[in-house]
């Protein structure tokens, strides 16, 4: 994996552990020579993971919609202006598609609706055979326990196949999660979609 896309919150969360783990992940990616791909933000955990990666000598690519450029939150620019590369795209959908194109794998840290949606959409793309890239939840402080329980419930109720559930890797430790992602072997699935425009 040469590039990992990280989905995470535009807020830092209340528990300092979230910030600490975002810093650890950013430094870990830099130490492994893995380029960070993310949503281009300068706020919340997004800014933390990017800053940590850059400070440790890593490389960071941000992808941000034009509509968010020039906005401010608490006196800070929403877009990160010190990245190795910042790509400005026309929409949120294009942003997700571009991050997916750039990345060799995906990690979701704690976040809100946007993070949940990004991770579940990339899972859906994997389920449909649009990609075979590893996807993991960095389950800091048990943050994703309820979501993982929901996935298991969906299997138990017949709405999700066990092999598709197995695509959602999870660990509370970044190094172990990266190891699981590197070892991931997806189940063969029919490729329902041939082109990005079909999504």
Image (cartoon, rainbow, N blue to C red):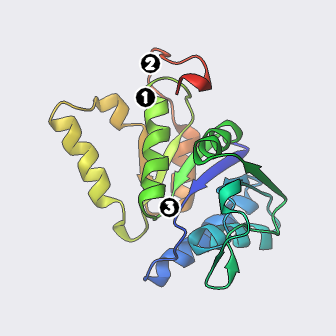
Is 144 left, or right, of 108 in this rendering? left
Residue topped by disc 1: 127
The numbered mark at residue 109 is: 3
Are circles 1 and 2 on residues that touch, CB within 8 Å? yes
Quadrant in the rendering for residue 97? top right
Above or below, 161 relative to 119: above
- Looking at the image, residue 53 sits to the left or right of residue 106; the answer is right
Per the model, the C-alpha gap separating discs 1 and 2 is 7 Å
* Residue 12: image location, x then y, percent: 52, 77
- The relative height of residue 163 versus residue 12 in the rendered view (above or below) is above
In which quarter of the view is residue 160 placed?
Answer: top left
Q: Residue at x 57, y 35 (%)?
A: 133
Query: Residue 87 appears at what percent x and percent y?
Result: 78, 51
Q: Position of residue 88 (x, y in %)?
A: 76, 52
Q: Nearer the viewer, residue 25 or 198?
A: 198
Q: Earlier in the sequence, mark 3 or mark 1?
A: 3
Q: Is residue 44 visible?
A: yes
Residue with the mark numbered 2: 189
Q: Secondary structure at mark 2?
A: loop
Residue 65 makes an appearance in the image:
no
């Amino acid at each position: 994996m040469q590039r990992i896309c990280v989905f995470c919150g535009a807020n830092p969360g209340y528990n300092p552990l979230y910030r600490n783990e975002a810093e650890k992940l950013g430094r870990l990616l830099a130490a492994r020579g893995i380029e960070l791909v993310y949503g281009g933000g300068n706020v919340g955990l997004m800014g933390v993971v990017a800053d940590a990666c850059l400070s440790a000598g890593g490389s960071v690519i941000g992808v941000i919609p034009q509509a968010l450029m020039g906005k401010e939150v608490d006196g800070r620019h929403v877009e990160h202006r010190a990245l190795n590369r910042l790509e400005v795209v026309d929409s949120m959908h294009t942003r997700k598609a571009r991050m997916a194109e750039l990345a060799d794998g995906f990690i979701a840290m704690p976040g809100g609706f946007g993070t949940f949606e990004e991770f579940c959409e990339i899972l859906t793309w994997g389920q449909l055979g649009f990609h075979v890239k590893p996807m993991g939840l960095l389950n800091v402080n048990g943050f994703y326990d309820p979501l993982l329980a929901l996935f298991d419930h969906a299997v138990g109720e017949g709405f999700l196949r066990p092999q598709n559930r197995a695509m959602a890797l999870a660990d509370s430790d970044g190094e172990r999660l990266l190891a699981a992602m590197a070892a991931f072997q997806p189940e063969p699935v029919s490729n329902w979609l041939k082109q990005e425009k079909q999504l």
